[in-house]
Amino acid sequence: MGSLSRRSVLRGSGVAAAAMAVGPLSPALALDRRRVAVLGGGMAGLAAAHELVERGFEVTVYERKALGGKARSIPVPGTARGGRRALPGEHGFRFFPGFYHHIPDTMARIPFGSNENGVFDNLVSAGMPLFPRSGGRDDQNLFGLIPDPRHLATPDAVKRFIVNELLGGNMISPVDATYFATRLVVFLSSCDERRLGQWEQTSWWDFVRAEQRSPEYQTVAARGLTRALVAAKEEIASTRTIGNMAEAFLYSFAGVGTNGRPPDQILNGPTNEVWIDPWVDLLRSKGVRFRSATTITGLQVAGGRITGARARTASGPATIDADWFVSAMPVERVTRLLSPAVLRADPSLEGLRGLVTDWMNGIQFYLKRPVTITDGHLAFLDSPWSLTGILQAGHWTNDFAATYGDGTAVDCLSVDVSDWTTPGILYGKPANRCTKAEVRAEVWAQMKASLEDTGASVLPDDVLHSFFLDPAIKWDPVSRRNSNDEPLLINTVDSWKLRPTARTALSNLFLAGDFCRTNVDLATMEGANESGRQAANAILAESGAGGAPAPIYRLHRPPEWEALKLVDQQLYRLGLKNTFDVG
């Protein structure tokens, strides 16, 4: 990483060429068609604003809560002492797979101190991941082995790698590992038409035929890997989406399609400090205006265009006027704006109501003493609440105790809860029916059940300094259940047809967000960033402004599987199964 120059990053991403190609605006645009209202200041909105302002547009970003959206860090109120900053909380910990391209490209364009590659240089390798098992099962370093790309070049090679090195005799039995490997080969050799026509309509649980296999196969191959890596529920998640991610992760771990980046990276400090705040500062310096505490409440429509966006602000109701509108809000917020007038102008937007969101929110545990677990990510495969986590202080450039809180917290164990509907082990209740204190106790107990199941003291109770639950989770004492102000889109079976592109039938309304159709095809920072670029490019084309569009990247497509995909294309068109889809 240290030898990578900013120039080489930009050259590799195509940004330098795009920047040089941006020409003057057309006269019409220069006079009165430059104003863009970006409705939402999360990852998609900031990406759209970045690309648009660099191409000469006047951009104003309107945000309801906080810039950065679900990617932001959150100072814990009332915890700063003695000149230190507040303890750093977050919606959930950040994870940057090696196959991300849009996010690193953006980061390399954000200056940060003396970093040669800007914010991009604040990414560091996460270290060895650990999958602690409960009930005395052996803990595993699932992806500790870095495959040679040749191990992924043929069906037999993939099977050998999965059975002999990755899963067989380790996480699950060799028989189950062989079966899982065969199912993965089916997907890898499937043509695009089958992936969209058949696997998009099949759940991952059904695709790997989990119902027919052992409980360990179900826990590890069907459920654990799906929830740990892509935060999706295997019974409802599209096989096309999960399979695409499995392929991307495999090649990323082999160092293919990553531009030389490690397969698993994290930031070297709280997200706002080392990424979001410098990004906002850069955009402000370029002329982007930000309006906070602004909730979009409606869209005014006339003549097939948006004539204004109604908003609720701290000073009262307001109407936002612009030439172009980018809706960069989460899908559950966008659907509230689908008035009869909007749907008459674009009936296809009705499909947004069919998209599904679920909960994946974080809780941070601040520790009085260092604990020894692993430097990398943790995935508690046996935990009812599908917990994942990471110890952060060891990756950060500052001294945690000297920088944050009251000086007695030395680390932060940041944990994501991906299942809020399954009963826990302490109270027999799902997370969405637990108070804040019960969530804390339950998550702690579930981690200890895996970390200390052999009698070792790994996470002693007296090491806990304090905790912070994502404030998006709100407890209602009357209904005795939680609500969630920031859920996550889930790529459910057959949902691709419901997801929009950046363009709408309204000539000046464009959509951005992780619910839009993107190449990465998953509700991630990467997908949100890509969608923001797509919206910016659509405005660039519609407006007639000069200049090159923002670069859009595709996941690595292994050429060695193309011949098998061509065969499968013919089989699919004949209504036949994939060659390897037997048994």
Image (cartoon, rainbow, N blue to C red):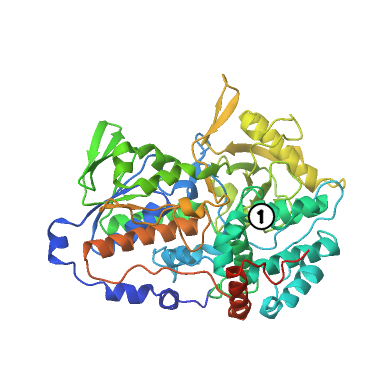
203 relative position to 32: left or right:
right
579 relative position to 296: left or right:
right
Q: Position of residue 20 (x, y in %)?
A: 29, 76
Q: Secondary structure at mark 1?
A: helix
Between 103 and 37, which is closer to the camera in this rendering? 37
Q: Position of residue 512 (x, y in %)?
A: 39, 53
Residue shown at the point (39%, 66%) measured from the top left:
109
Q: Position of residue 99 (x, y in %)?
A: 55, 67
Residue highlighted by disc 1 = 204
350 relative position to 399: left or right:
left
Between 234 and 386, which is closer to the camera in this rendering? 234
Q: Quadrant of the N terminus?
A: bottom right
Q: Quadrant of residue 548?
A: bottom left
552 relative position to 136: left or right:
left
Q: Is residue 43 above or below residue 569?
A: above
Q: How many marks?
A: 1
Q: Which amino acid type is shown beneath numbered disc 1? A: Trp
Q: Position of residue 156 (x, y in %)?
A: 75, 77
Q: Examine the rendering and report whether any part of residue 80 can be seen.
A: yes
Residue shown at the point (72%, 73%) measured from the top left:
158
Q: Quadrant of the C terminus?
A: bottom right
Q: Quadrant of residue 502?
A: bottom left
**Residue lying at the far front of the rendered structure:** 574
Q: Is residue 179 above or below residue 354?
A: below
Between 90 and 76, which is closer to the camera in this rendering? 90
Q: Examine the rendering and report whether any part of residue 125 can be seen.
A: no
Between 219 and 369, which is closer to the camera in this rendering? 219
**Residue lying at the far top of the rendered structure:** 478
Q: Is residue 546 above or below residue 421?
A: below
Q: Residues within 10 Å of mark 1 (few under 14, many from 20)?
A: many
